[in-house]
Image (cartoon, coloured by chain):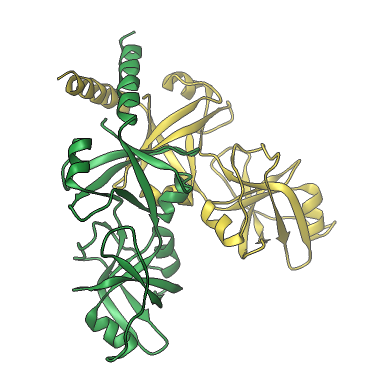
Chain colours: A yellow, B green
Amino acid sequence: MQEELIKEIVKKVMDTIGKSNTIPIEVSARHVHLSKEHIEKLFGRDYNMSKKKDLSQPGQFQYEERVMLIGPKGILRGVAILGPAREKTQVEISKTDAVVLGINPPVRESGNLEGSEKIYIATEKAVVEAMESVIIAKRHIHMTPEDAKKFGVEDKQLVSVKVKSDRPVVFEDVLVRVNKEYKLSMHIDFDEANASGYKEGVVGEIIFF
Amino acid sequence: MQEELIKEIVKKVMDTIGKSNTIPIEVSARHVHLSKEHIEKLFGRDYNMSKKKDLSQPGQFQYEERVMLIGPKGILRGVAILGPAREKTQVEISKTDAVVLGINPPVRESGNLEGSEKIYIATEKAVVEAMESVIIAKRHIHMTPEDAKKFGVEDKQLVSVKVKSDRPVVFEDVLVRVNKEYKLSMHIDFDEANASGYKEGVVGEIIFF
């Protein structure tokens, strides 16, 4: 049967590709990137934010301080703030979080905030209304130009990634982001992690069909 | 290039298969199936449970009554009870729910409860400790023998299903369950629904590689 033959060929190609296409996976918890203006409003003009820890992507870090997100249906407390400050405030949550808050943010690439959702961000001192700030981060892979060459992919390409867990899933439309400052890592959110049985050490594999 | 040719063949097979392999998807919210013994303990010996509505699978229904799940780290209120009563109490939650409750249930087929998690189930009147009762339901497809024949699959076979949404995912290891009483439907939980951009009307497609 021709169909059987195709399956066999495909399996062989997959196995071959699999050996070299392993990508570490990290799960992004809900977090905010704040603008300087919002940091001043939420913490005060002369307040100095404290760095808590560096993140896997070079230059990115988490602050000690946290904020509260307030939506029409619910509140999320203790939300992490990532640095450095950005030009525009960006809030990244999961669909599960969105249902709790009662908002409907789009699935978007970081930085693409036009028409995205609004939310109230609060500390014990102040509240700001962050218009067009909330997205569900589109799953993506950070990689260097060398990684891209090895995998045979380009910046902004959408690829499929198989998560090799005991609840296996192939995520399609995974955005490739290439920059020499990046460290190879696929970022998914907690909904995606839970749905795919992610545990520490589980890896992904780019597949090409 | 041979690889390009394979991709093209595969795409054509997928397109062809796609036309006839559409499966409606339903999202299962957290729920419990209670044993007669637990119904008596939780609601009283002479209490009559009220049916709220029929579910899509023939003979299955939801009661008006609800229960509370109490775990070491959290509580979930207003959890649906499905009928009819079962021999053994079974609690089906998502990984997100499990994290809230602070338990670690296995991903399992319905009815396979050996070594699964325990939980306290409560009403305003009573609490029961349901040992080996909590699972994360393994995603599955209900179908009739006629559907199985059409799709070329068998009872208990594991298949891959592509969810055709704007956050597309291929779920692997989807369990096929064949019974002449069933109605064609794929059941996923809210983590899987959120991760795959499920909305009403989104359908799945069995793919064979």
Residue B87 in the image: above or below residue A150: below
Front residue of A12 and B143: B143
Mark yes or no: residue B28 visible. yes
Front residue of A46 and A149: A149
Across and down, in percent, residue A3 comes to: 20, 22
Residue B159 in the image: above or below residue A51: above
Across and down, in percent, residue B187 comes to: 33, 52
Front residue of A122 and B154: B154
Residue extending furthest toward the right: A45
Q: Residue A110 falls in which quadrant of the image? A: top right
Residue that appears at 48% across and 36% down:
A185
Q: In which quarter of the image is the C terminus of chain A?
A: top left
Residue that appears at 62% across and 42% down:
A60
Q: Quadrant of the N terminus of chain A?
A: top left
Q: Residue B14 falls in which quadrant of the image? A: top left
Name the side, left or right, on which A185 lies relative to A203. right
Residue that appears at 42% across and 64% down:
B97
Across and down, in percent, residue A36 comes to: 79, 48
